[in-house]
């Protein structure tokens, strides 16, 4: 009889471990399936890869969930409006993941806005979450993580493995530039700040970028730096994407222009 208790204890320990694992999975599923926004505007095919691996084709007004990976096809601009009224607009050829998004008006301590830009580019406009909990927003890219300070900004990741012929006679006024990838843009992460401030962080260092500035880093180990002129960064979604927000966006663009930003933002 003396040996029965150790066996029972081992069984109990195993049961606790299984239960703990189940609870962890349940916790992950709790955020992975939550609706966090809708497709506000769309100009072409937009694919949605769910956390369980299933793939859907989205349309305007389709819902998106925490854990989704969105893929905009060639010539597709897609604007996602989140439940905190923030917006992410994807440019063509972009892969963007909503790693974890959570917002409730009465629970600021539970805020979370974690995203990943895996390919391509986007424009981000801060919503209520970013205004009350700036430190809870992060956009991971292959070269750095972007944080906000109440912001409208553009981020573009140029992948060296995807060549695009440059425009005839185009120059590349970016350090270590390599013509032939995206016209006028060298491989790496490019940012432009239209309003507020962002902070770009990687293993090489940390750099703040206020409104009117452009930034660049070629890889995760090279410090981000300020680029005085516009290196050729453009973001031109259809005019309808600005819709009711055309007033604020126009003012943001004017402020940026006065600060030296000459990229096209509509």
Image (cartoon, helix red, strand yellow):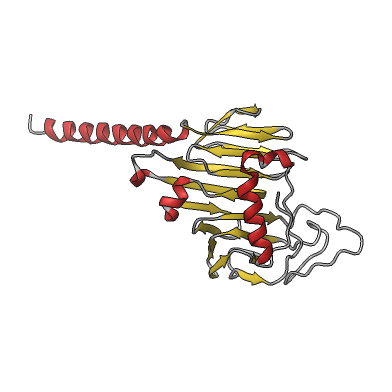
Q: Is residue 239 above or below residue 204?
A: above
Left or right: 245 as drawn, with respect to 76: left
Q: Camera-side residue: 65 or 125?
A: 125
Image location of residue 167, percent across then percent down: 88, 58
Q: Residue at x 18, y 32 (%)?
A: 7
Residue 237 image offset from top left, x and y in percent = 72, 44
Above or below, comparing residue 167 to residue 74 in the picture: below
Is any part of residue 102 visible from this angle?
A: yes
- Residue at 17% over, 31% down: 8
- Residue 60 or residue 64, whichever sits in front: 60
Residue at 55% from the left image edge and 53% from the top image edge: 140
* Image-based side of 136 in relation to 17, left or right: right
Above or below: residue 90 compared with residue 253: above
Q: Residue furthest left?
A: 1
Q: Quadrant of the N terminus?
A: top left
Residue 65 rendering spot, x and y as whole percentages: 51, 33
**Can I make out residue 123 in this image?**
no
In the image, taking residue 127 as reference, residue 107 lies left or right, namely left
């Amino acid at each position: 009889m003396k040996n029965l208790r150790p066996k029972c204890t081992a069984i109990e320990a195993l049961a606790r471990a299984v239960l703990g694992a189940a609870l962890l999975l349940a916790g992950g599923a709790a955020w992975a399936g939550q609706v966090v926004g809708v497709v506000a505007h769309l100009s072409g095919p937009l694919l949605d890869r769910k956390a369980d691996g299933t793939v859907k084709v989205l349309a305007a007004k389709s819902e998106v969930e925490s854990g989704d990976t969105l893929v905009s096809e060639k010539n597709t601009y897609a604007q996602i409006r989140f439940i905190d009224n923030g917006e992410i607009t994807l440019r063509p050829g972009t892969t963007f993941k909503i790693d974890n998004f959570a917002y409730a008006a009465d629970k600021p301590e539970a805020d979370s806005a974690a995203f990943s830009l895996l390919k391509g580019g986007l424009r981000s406009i801060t919503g209520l979450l970013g205004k009350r909990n700036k430190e809870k927003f992060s956009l991971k890219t292959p070269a750095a993580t972007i944080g906000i300070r109440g912001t409208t900004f553009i981020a573009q990741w140029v992948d060296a493995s995807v060549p695009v012929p440059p425009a005839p006679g185009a120059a590349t006024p970016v350090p270590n530039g390599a013509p032939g990838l995206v016209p006028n843009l060298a491989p790496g992460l490019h940012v432009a700040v239209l309003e507020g401030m962002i902070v770009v962080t990687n293993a090489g260092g940390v750099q703040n970028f206020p409104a009117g500035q452009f930034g660049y880093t070629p890889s995760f180990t090279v410090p981000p730096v300020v680029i005085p002129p516009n290196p050729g960064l453009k973001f031109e979604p259809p005019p309808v994407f600005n819709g009711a927000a055309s007033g604020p966006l126009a003012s943001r663009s004017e402020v940026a222009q006065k600060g030296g930003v000459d990229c096209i933002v509509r």
